[in-house]
């Protein structure tokens, strides 16, 4: 991978991390709040169904995850197994897109 | 000796291990998390069916581990962002302790609420 793209990946990893830092703080607060009386579908869906605010929040959360996690996994694979090159970069891209679609499906599931 | 245990046994190395390990486990967990939420597509009853499974003590234990991993990855990540993006200050050495403390506090809050 050329230097320019490496810098782009580095920046994408950091800027997605900044978005995730805010999202994860909110997520942890919601988790600790939500489990007080045990989890139920009624409680979760009561919060998320038809709520455009939560929908936008989780859609952004998933987008940041889909950027952040595959780049991190790519680094781990490259450093642990010494695997580098176009095939790994393609796998990173495909897993990012798959994670985004899989995550947005979940966001839609609790919104619709 | 360069790669020996003594050369690696310092707080910043263990912060690296925790950040990498937690990141890896969270990435593996994510598809299952999205699958579980996707159960809602089949209706609230399907999601409730899955949520009953999460009441098992062993699953709660695993959930607590995941919350701790998420908090640890968050705290360690914020530490890294502060090291990379802010000018170096002496108090940044204390960030390791802050990161560990925040993670533990979140994990404890979850345990106290869930049990």
Image (spheres, coloured by chain):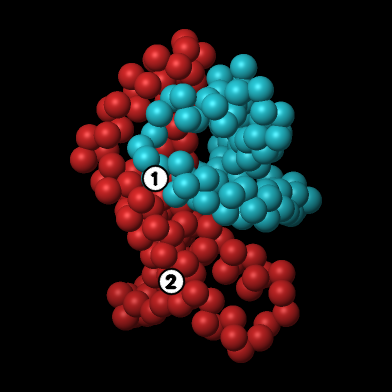
The residue at 50%/50% (across/down) is A28
Residue identifier under label 2: B101
Residue toward you, B47 or A64: B47
The mark found on residue B73 in the picture is none
Residue furthest to the front: A37
Quarter of the image that includes the N terminus of chain B: bottom left
**x, y percent for residue A110:** 56, 23
**x, y percent for residue B36:** 42, 25
Relative to residue A10, is residue B105 depicted above or below?
below
Q: Chain of mark 1?
A: A
- Check disc 1 and report its element: helix, strand or loop: helix
Residue identifier under label 1: A36
Residue toward you, B37 or B112: B112
Chain letter for the cyan colouring in the rendering: A
Q: Chain of mark 2?
A: B
Q: Is residue B115 visible to us here?
A: yes
Relative to residue A103, is residue B42 depicted above or below?
above
The residue at 41%/50% (across/down) is B67
**Nearer the viewer's eye, disc 1 or disc 2?**
1
Kindly indicate whether the residue at mark 2 contacts the one at mark 1 (C-beta within 8 angstroms): no
Q: Is residue A31 left or right of residue A22?
A: left
- Answer few, some or many: residues within 10 Å of disc 2's Cα (few below 14, many 20 plus, some between 14 and 19): some
Residue furthest to the left: B57
Residue toward you, A90 or B61: B61
In the rendered image of the structure, the colour used to display chain B is red
The residue at 56%/19% (across/down) is A109
**x, y percent for residue A18:** 68, 55
């Amino acid at each position: 991978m050329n230097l320019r793209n490496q810098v782009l990946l580095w920046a994408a990893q950091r800027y997605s991390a900044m978005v995730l830092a805010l999202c994860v703080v909110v997520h942890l607060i919601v988790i600790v709040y939500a489990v007080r009386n045990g989890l139920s579908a009624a409680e979760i869906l009561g919060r998320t169904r038809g709520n455009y605010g939560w929908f936008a929040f989780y859609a952004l959360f998933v987008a940041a995850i889909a950027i952040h996690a595959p780049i991190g996994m790519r680094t781990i694979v490259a450093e642990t197994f010494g695997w580098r090159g176009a095939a790994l970069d393609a796998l990173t891209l495909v897993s990012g897109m798959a994670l985004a679609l899989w995550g947005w499906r979940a966001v839609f599931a609790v919104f619709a | 000796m360069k790669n020996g245990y003594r050369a690696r046994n310092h707080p910043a190395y263990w912060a690296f291990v925790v950040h990498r390990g937690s990141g890896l486990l969270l990435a593996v967990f994510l598809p299952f998390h999205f699958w579980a939420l996707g159960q809602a597509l089949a209706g609230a009853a399907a999601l409730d069916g899955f949520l009953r499974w999460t009441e098992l003590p062993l699953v709660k234990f695993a959930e607590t581990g995941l919350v701790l991993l998420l908090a640890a990855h968050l705290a360690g990540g914020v530490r890294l962002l502060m090291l990379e993006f802010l000018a170096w200050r002496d108090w940044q050495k204390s960030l390791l302790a802050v990161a560990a403390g925040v993670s533990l506090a979140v994990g404890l809050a979850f345990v106290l609420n869930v049990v």
